[in-house]
Image (tube, grey):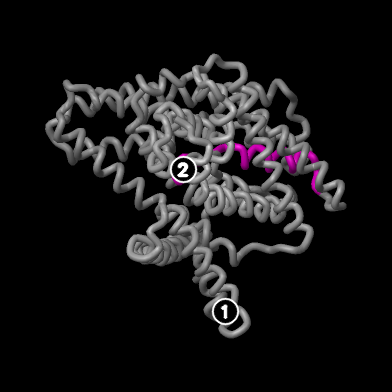
Amino acid sequence: MAPTKEITSFAKNKNRAGLMFYSFTILLSLAALFSFLNHKFLKLPETIGLMILALVTAIIIISMNGVWPTGYDFFCQVVIDLDFKTLLLDVLLSFLLFAGALHINISDLEKEKWPVLLFSTLGVLVSTALVGFLVYGVARLIGIPFPLMHCLLFGALISPTDPIAVISILQSAGVDKSLELKIEGESLFNDGVGVVVFTSILLFAGAGEESHEAGAATVLQLFGEEAIGGLLFGLALGFLGTKLLRSVQDDGKIAVMLTLAFAMGGYSLASFIHVSGPLAMVVAGLYIGNNIALPTFSESTRKFLYEIWEMLDDVLNALLFVMIGLILHTLEYGMGYILMSVAAIFIVLLARFVSVGLPYSLLKHQESQPMKTILTLTWGGLRGGISVALALSLAPELSRELIIFMTYAVVLFSIIVQGLSLGRFVRMLKID
């Protein structure tokens, strides 16, 4: 008797889950090995060291194609089975944002609320438009077919910055705490805003007639529902989470399980009710983190929670940056792609300078030389996994291969070149 459709579908999903787990095991093993090698020999900031080792591994894999095609195909399949876009956007991102927000002091962040608000909203919008139009102009100049809406999609996904690699470097360079908070606060919030902007542009740029029928009112409604809804939902999660944690503050294990449930379940529920999961996780993390930091909360449980989430954050970041490095051998490229990618690196830096400088000029600040702060914010605006994941989520008809290659080039440049030189750059500017 032939298997039913339900049984066949179940078998396929089970097999896919098994392959993903197998690939995840390989990724975790590589992350552990690279972390060991970096700690013992390279002694670079962890995310940069892991990225470099993963890139070297990817180059070795590429070289295997001519002499050992089976090995090359094996590693290609590992990356495919992992499904980077799903792994980051649906699994890792909730943990990373919640963990990042958990340790931020709202009182300190409030002092930088206007820079953080403007950088993560107006800054993202300005950067998206500037990158999109400049990339479109370069594509026309080179003679590469690259529709304007597709260029704006690239602008939206490349505009959010990543705080993971840059914070430890800024701290070791002795940068003022206010500058750290500007970069870290902006990076936490602009991930959510960037995803909302990306989704809004996708309404216009997507294939099919329905996408082109979306008007400005539809986009504004989506932006409002996603952004404002995400903030309110995160506040509700934080309030409920704090109440539950206070009731079990004498048991650290249950407290950890509750925070894990709020990060995973809250993010999934946000997607179900169509509000921004990233923004909800940031707000929930801030609310819960600042409430458990109060003297009335159990010190032993608070310390246990912080240690667990810090360890989880480190492990997940290691996985994330190793996978970014390993994607190299799966990319398609040509001379046109390379030219566009080189141009994109300079365009993104220019857009970052403008998108930081413009909002900063609207604020009152105490620095005698604000240009130094703007330059540090520009060079410290590293791009990371969320940009790669959004690029991978695109349909083929949306210039997917070109956008992925450009995104990958910008992310690599920002993490390796900007990341490695940031400490020296800050000391050269002598920001205090």
- Image quarter where the C terminus lies is top left
Secondary element at tag 2:
helix
Q: Nearer the viewer, residue 142 or 155?
A: 142
Tell me, yes or no, if residue 415 can be seen here: yes
Quick check: 111 left or right of 79?
left
The magenta span reads 146-166
Q: Are marks 1 and 2 in contact (CB under 8 Å)?
A: no
Point out residue 67 in the picture as x, y percentages from the top left corner: 59, 85
33 up-or-down from 319: above or below: below
Tell me, yes or no, if residue 12 can be seen here: no
Residue at the far bottom: name it: 67
Q: Which residue is mark 2?
A: 166
Mark 1 or mark 2: which is in front?
2
The amino acid pointed to by label 1 is Met
Q: Which residue is mark 1?
A: 64
Quick check: 163 left or right of 388?
left
